[in-house]
Amino acid sequence: MQYKEWMEEHRDVTRRFFLGMGAVGIVGLNSTVAGVGRSEDSSLNADWMPAVEYLTRDENFKNYGRGNPPPDQLPLDKRRAVGLERDTWQLEVIADPESNSKIENPLSKELGAALDWKALMKLAETQAVRFLHVMACTNGRAPCGMGLWEGVPLREVIWMARPKQNIRRIFYYGYHNDDPKQRFQSSLPIGRVLEDPPGDFPVILCYKLNDKWLSPVRGGPVRMLVPDAYGNKSVKWLQRILLTNNSQANDTYALWNNDTESSLKTWACIIHAPQKIKSVQSIPISGIAQVGMSGLHRVQYWLHPQKKLLPENDPYFTSGDWKNAEALPPPEDWGGGLPNGKLPASILHIDPTSGKPIRWPLRNTLIHWAALMPAASPGLYDLRCRTIDANGVAQPMPRPFLKSGYNAIQKITLEVEA
Ligand SMILES: Nc1nc2c(c(=O)[nH]1)N[C@H]1C(S)=C(S)[C@@H](COP(=O)(O)O)O[C@H]1N2
Ligand SMILES: [Mo]
């Protein structure tokens, strides 16, 4: 698969919009694909691919998973031996030996009390939850993928361990070839695990993506899935959770200069725009936006003739001539390999009767957007896009810094011919 098919799928998502505007737009849709990211970058960029169908198939996610070899590439018998298959998987929930945390019922292998797959599935019978959530890397210029995740709220398993006192955080890691240097560890405040702000999802022990067992490369059999956060909190090949009185975020990703406690940011990028178009044609463009912690009010674009000067002392182009794009409604076909593109039952924030989201857009998901720009006179142009979040703040504010999630304003070049 891939590139071409993905582009076709995005085109399907946006086609209805352009059909509504008359056929003229469709011509340009076939032309080309924009690059993501660095403001000067207009090259093709493979990072775009995962976002094109609404839900991303497991195998189409952009992958991160350290290890030499990465645990998903171990041969099957080795995976089974180290607890990376469903029939051998075990999760330990214990007190941090370097801390003074007290728990009464450690789920340890030593005591023969670790949680296994059967026990997890038993919990799933009554406790399983499903929700839509984007996977995004703090440093990535496009989301890794958009998923429908299923799992058991982590707190169910934490309570099984009967935590008592001196517990402020948890930290956790997955299989790492038994080499401490390869360990990828993340952490959370215990409070975030035990309680969810209204409308937010629980942290889950995740075992399904798009209604199928989580694959080895996606972190299966079980990964952590932490809502609102960038992907580094969602540790793959999960095998061990420690309850600690350590008040610090002792994440591996923090050692690499990342702001690991950052919530997802709201930002937009362009997927389709013609590189060249005739001055008699309207100009169709489309893309995606990530809906972060502050929600999404709208997506905007700005077509700026290169020969005109840019506004001075305005690094984020707040005085640009921004126009509103159209945020597309929830898809009819959710993609992701779901049978007939239909969502399964019982998803948080999806109305059970209509099968539609209770509001749109949902936080921590993607939306697709499109616009048909009026024909422009011949010349070279810079095309930019941005979001306005639900607080009315324009991208890349209110959090423009790197290492807490990428959200620079994208710029691509477009040529209008006589
Ligand atoms: N065990 C393990 N889990 C991990 C990582 C890792 O290197 N090892 N990388 C994390 C990071 S930085 C990201 S962005 C996400 C990416 O998830 P994906 O590969 O499913 O897209 O996985 C996270 N989980
Ligand atoms: Mo990441």
Image (cartoon, rainbow, N blue to C red):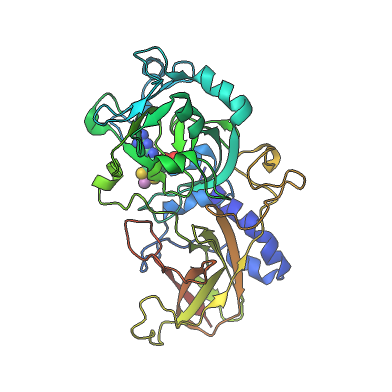
> What residue is at 43 percent from the left and 44 percent from the top?
62
Which residue is most to the front? 165
Q: Position of residue 19 (x, y in %)?
A: 71, 65
> What residue is at 54 percent from the left and 33 percent from the top?
151
> What residue is at 57 percent from the left and 24 percent from the top?
123
* 340 in relation to 176, above or below: below
Q: Position of residue 160 (x, y in %)?
A: 47, 24
> What residue is at 36 percent from the left and 23 percent from the top?
74
Query: Is residue 64 at all visible to an observer of this figure?
Result: no
Front position in the image: 400 or 143: 400
Query: Is residue 184 at all visible to an observer of this figure?
Result: yes
Q: Is residue 122 left or right of residue 267?
A: right
* 364 in relation to 302, above or below: above
Front position in the image: 280 or 342: 342
Which residue is most to the right? 353
The quarter of the displayed image where residue 248 is located: top left
* 30 in relation to 97, above or below: below
The quarter of the displayed image where residue 66 is located: top left
Q: Position of residue 147 (x, y in %)?
A: 54, 43
Q: Position of residue 219 (x, y in %)?
A: 43, 32
Q: Is residue 112 left or right of residue 324?
A: left
Q: Looking at the image, how many numbered discs can be counted on the residues?
A: 0
